[in-house]
Amino acid sequence: MSAERRQLALYIHIPFCDRRCPYCHFYCFVNKDEALPLRYSENLARELSTHADLLQGKISSVYFGGGTPSALSAGAREFLCHWMREELGPLLQTDAEITLEVNPESALPGTLDAWVEAGVNRISVGIQSMDQEVLSFLGRLNTPSSNRRALELCSERVTNLSVDLILATPTSSTGALESSLALVHEYPITHLSAYLLEIHPETRFGREVAQGRWTPRPGEEQAASYLSAVEFLGSAGFEHYELSNFARAGKTSKHNQSYWEGTSYLGLGASAHSFDGLRRWWNLSDAGAWCEALEQARSPEAGSEILDAAQRRDEEILLGLRTCRGLDPHWLQGRRALWDAWIEAGYAEIAAGRPRLTPQGWLVMDEIARVLAQSEGQDSTHREART
């Protein structure tokens, strides 16, 4: 970890799931080993202890992601909650944000109480949709009724409540989108993440699409769904502060912002990634092998890389473009023709002297980032700026 960094985000990966969703490309699995969740939890504590001397008072956010952290076995949950209070707590900044990912079907009063008593002050609920047809297509275990029950339980326990939605599935309709978004009027939701359905080759959906078994929604329909969500949430008082994220005033995700702003982060658990500003490393993507390495006092790292100047430039562009803060003003220098063309097309704007993308621009962000990375500070023609 860089000694100059004053704060750090901590991500804790819990890979266990009751069912693997067909669109999920993260490392997770349905566990068959009853002893593994507690063993895995003990090794999370062991991994953190190898970094503890560098973390004192620096952790600004903690995020328990997965997988399904809320579905951990009772023994593993009890261990982690005790660990949070006794060992992790002293390493946190006083205003640290501590988020727990929750799936509606595993949101139970006793389970939630244990996490909140241990320090969780923000809950992110994986709703995905309020339409049963969409949920069935996505392979989810939750239902519209379990979604409502989970939101009620979570809103009674924390004041910082986030939900995740997936947009533009082949089975979704305008009504399905509206019913999902309407949750922000029914519950005290402070944050919402809305993602277009992504098809990754290594997932079941990826294989099905490659085999021609079904076809994703056309790009223009996906764009319309996204822009409808942007308009609805804006009218409901949410700030669209990042490509897929919306928040009420003062409720942006501190943890996710640390990624977008280039703050150091430490990942614990199998497949977790870490970054210290120059070096990125990642852990073994096998829970058993990761546990074994730590138990034998070996590093659980699977690989690492030092970012060169071009990689740092590309990350600065992508991370800056995806937020409403935008890019540093120096990205205007020698590129004014590019930005003028994007502004004319409705893709960009200048706010407080900083170039940034509009919601329409976020839909073509990768192409804009590519053009910027290749511009090398040279003023480009109006034609080259077209995406």
Image (cartoon, helix red, strand yellow):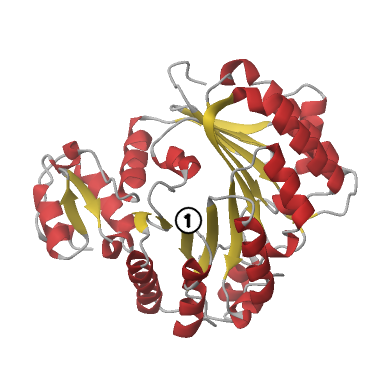
Q: Is 278 located above or below residue 316 in the figure?
A: above
Question: Which residue does the image show at 63% across and 21% down from the upper left?
Answer: 51
Question: Residue at 52% across / 66% down in the picture?
Answer: 165
Q: Is residue 293 above or below residue 22?
A: above
**Viewer-closest of 283 and 33:** 33
Indicate the amino acid at tag 1. Thr
On-image quarter of the C terminus? bottom left
Q: Position of residue 32 (x, y in %)?
A: 87, 54
Badge 1 element: loop
Q: In this view of the protein, which residue sits in the foreground, 247 or 216?
A: 247
Residue found at x 20% / y 57%: 348
The total number of labels drawn is 1
Q: Residue furthest front?
A: 156
Does residue 196 lie above or below 13 as drawn? below
**Image coordinates for residue 80, horizontal then vertical, percent:** 76, 37
Residue 58, visible in the rendered structure: yes
Residue 333: quarter of image? top left
**Percent of width and height locating residue 171:** 54, 83
Q: From the viewer's side, name the closer residue of 106 and 67.
A: 106
Q: Which residue sits at x=58%, y=19%?
A: 56
- Horizontal side, residue 382 vs residue 231: left or right: left
From the image, tell me which residue sits under label 1.
190
**87 above or below 253?**
above
> Does the image show residue 16?
no
- Left or right: residue 239 versus residue 192 is left
Q: Dividing the picture into quarters, in which one does residue 152 lie?
A: bottom right
Where is residue 331 shown, x and y percent of the image?
A: 19, 41
